[in-house]
Amino acid sequence: MPFVRDTVTIFQREIAPTLRDPLGLLFTMMQPLLFLFLFGPLLSGNTGLQEAPWQWFVPGILIMMCLSGPMMAGYFLLVELIGGAMERMLVTPISRTAMLIGRTLKEFVVLLAQAALIIGLSVPLGFRPNAAGVLAGLALLVIFGIGLGALSFVLAIASAPGGELFYGITQLIMFPLLLLSGVLLPIESGPAWLQTVAAFNPVTYIVDAERALFAGDLTSMSALYGLLAAVAVCAIGLTLGTRAMRRGI
């Protein structure tokens, strides 16, 4: 019970600024929204897609949002580490593991809200979601997002007090992960060397899984591979994040 109480306390602390500033939540979605409304219509004439453009593109947008959101979640922890707010929290009896879980739960809620908004805005454009597939796809997205958020916290702790390491690594890996996962254009239309490199990108399998799930293909091998990749990222993130919270601060 003390651990649950500590987790709820941290979650409430983290979610409060977001609830007080809903426009800030929309501002963080500007890049996905721009791609949705300005880049998505360009795919209508792409004959290389094996399915309807919006059915193919919307799941990729959700992954893009996940990369630009939870991956940058450590920024707020880094600000607290630099400003000294985190040191004041550490003198309290709150569990350090609860500090990580509470923060990741906040990312969980924000990610679900953003995903629901993206899906809702996509329906008038021509997106036709499968109800069961959407629920499964959102669950997969949350698993992946929690793992990314935890890894972001690990990077923030390792980057304190300067912060240069955090900004450098996140900017260095975000766009390769995005471009080599087939979010914007089919990887199959690229050269062989690009497809080979993309095969080592775990985000590739998660994107393919999201597209299969949103299409209603819940038992496909793509969904299985994506689930395994998301669970692996989540397990690694939570393990390293818990260890960093306990020892690294």
Image (spheres, rainbow, N blue to C red):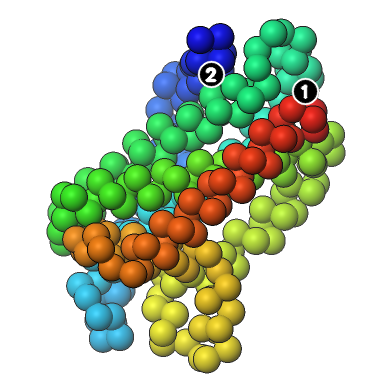
Q: Residue at x 51, y 83 (%)?
A: 195
Judged left or right of residue 54, residue 227 is right
Residue 245 visible in the snapshot: yes
Q: Which mark is residue 83?
A: 1
- The image position of residue 22, as x and y in percent, is 40, 28
- Depicted 217 relative to depicted 148: above or below: below
**Image quadrant in which the C terminus is located:** top right
- Provide the secondary structure element on which disc 2 rests: helix
Q: Which mark is residue 7?
A: 2
- Provide the secondary structure element on which disc 1 rests: helix
Judged left or right of residue 164, residue 4 is left
Judged left or right of residue 30, residue 87 is right
Asked if disc 1 and disc 2 are in contact, CB closer than 8 Å, the reply is no
Furthest residue in direction right, as rendered: 162
The amino acid type, in three-letter code, at marker 2 is Thr
How many residues crowd around disc 2 within 10 Å: few (fewer than 14), some, or many (20 or more)? many
- The image position of residue 166, as x and y in percent, is 73, 46
Q: Residue at x 69, y 8 (%)?
A: 93
How many residues crowd around disc 1 within 10 Å: few (fewer than 14), some, or many (20 or more)? few
Q: Residue at x 41, y 57 (%)?
A: 227
- Depth check, front residue: 162 or 7: 7
Q: Residue at x 56, y 9 (%)?
A: 2
- The image position of residue 238, as x and y in percent, is 60, 39
Q: Which mark is residue 168?
A: none
Q: CA distance from mark 1 to mark 2?
A: 22 Å
The amino acid type, in three-letter code, at marker 1 is Gly
Furthest residue in direction bottom, as rendered: 192
